[in-house]
Amino acid sequence: MFDLARLTDSGLVARIDYHESLSSTSDRALTLGAEGATELPLLVLAEQQTAGRGRGSNRWFAAPGALTFSLVLEAPADRLPLRRWPQVALAAGVAVADALRSFSPAADLSLKWPNDVFLSGRKVCGILSESVPGWRDRLVVGIGVNVNNREQSLDDKESSSKTAKPIALIDHDGLERDLTKVLLEILDQFDRRWQELLHNQFIPIAAAYRERCLLTGKTVRLSQTAGNELVGVCQGIDDTGTLLLRTERGTQPIVSGTILGWDDSAR
Ligand code: BTN
């Protein structure tokens, strides 16, 4: 059970919409956001999520012990214009990695572009950032973290075969965590990064991301929306959050795409 009083008292969210069981916290958050919820940031929290969604058509399976929540956020166009929204998911990845590190300082935490958090080379957290239909200044950030749910099989088609098996924090050191504390730490770290975003300060976020970028120096295969595939050596992200891929045609800036796989042998 979550300690809702503690979450409320933290002041990190304006309202909590709590459910023992919910199909998808992001679906619920999108509905509340579209209906005009006024107390933002709004946290939609589920003890158990039964039909979580991932990027694209992927599903997100969360066994008991996983942390699943979504935030409805207000992004005023003069402070965080639409073109910078991809930075939100990158910032959320940094926030989760920093939060998990505070619980497990020795853990090998990294970020797989754009916003998967990896632990010991396996996915521990997925993040889904979506705009609220009908609103130009609202978005929903959905976060799923494997905390106390031991190794399980996520149906994550985005993962390469090498990383298909996800991992939970508990697999790393056998310690069961208080989910309220983990959530509070993530919300705190995210709030810090959110303030940076609203003050147009992406550079510290980009620097933190680069320190943890799993793909830097690796040969990456990526598919883009137009359906074409690109292969190149990852150069990390630049100060705006764009992925840089060194290909045979020079360095290509990548704003969106799906990583299909990677290997360690840089060309
Ligand atoms: C991905 O890795 O593809 C993103 C996964 C995002 C999962 C979270 S769990 C909480 C929120 N609710 C959802 O339905 N999805 C997100």
Image (cartoon, rainbow, N blue to C red):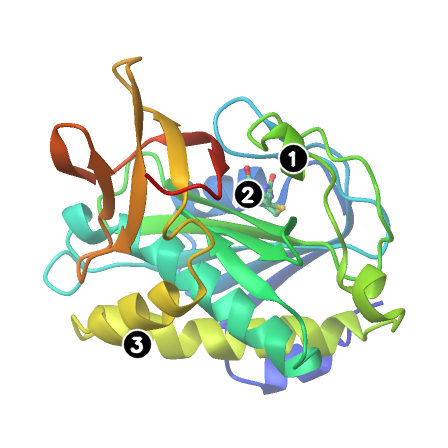
Q: How many marks are shown on the rendered structure?
A: 3
Q: What separation in Å lies between label 3 and label 2 (alpha carbons)?
A: 22 Å
Q: What separation in Å lies between label 2 and label 1 (alpha carbons)?
A: 28 Å
The residue that label 1 is drawn on is 162
Numbered disc 1: secondary structure: helix
The answer to whether the residue labelled 2 contacts the one labelled 1, judged by CB atoms less than 8 Å apart, is: no
The residue that label 2 is drawn on is 26
Q: What separation in Å lies between label 1 and label 3 (alpha carbons)?
A: 36 Å
Whether residue 4 is visible, yes or no, is no
In the image, 233 versus 109, the foreground residue is 233
The reply to whether the residue tagged 2 has its Cβ within 8 angstroms of ligand 1 is yes
The residue that label 3 is drawn on is 195
In x, y percent, where is residue 220? 39, 35
Mark 3 residue crowding within 10 angstroms, few (<14) / some (14–19) / many (20+): few
In x, y percent, where is residue 100? 63, 72
Q: Earlier in the sequence, mark 3 or mark 2?
A: 2
Residue at 26% of width from left, 55% of height from top? 237
In the image, 39 versus 118, the foreground residue is 118
Whether residue 167 is visible, yes or no, is yes
The amino acid on which the numbered mark 2 sits, given as a three-letter code, is Ser
State whether residue 164 is above or below residue 12: above
In x, y percent, where is residue 31? 49, 39
Q: Earlier in the sequence, mark 1 or mark 3?
A: 1
Mark 2 residue crowding within 10 angstroms, few (<14) / some (14–19) / many (20+): many
Along the horizontal axis of the image, is 158 left or right of 231?
right
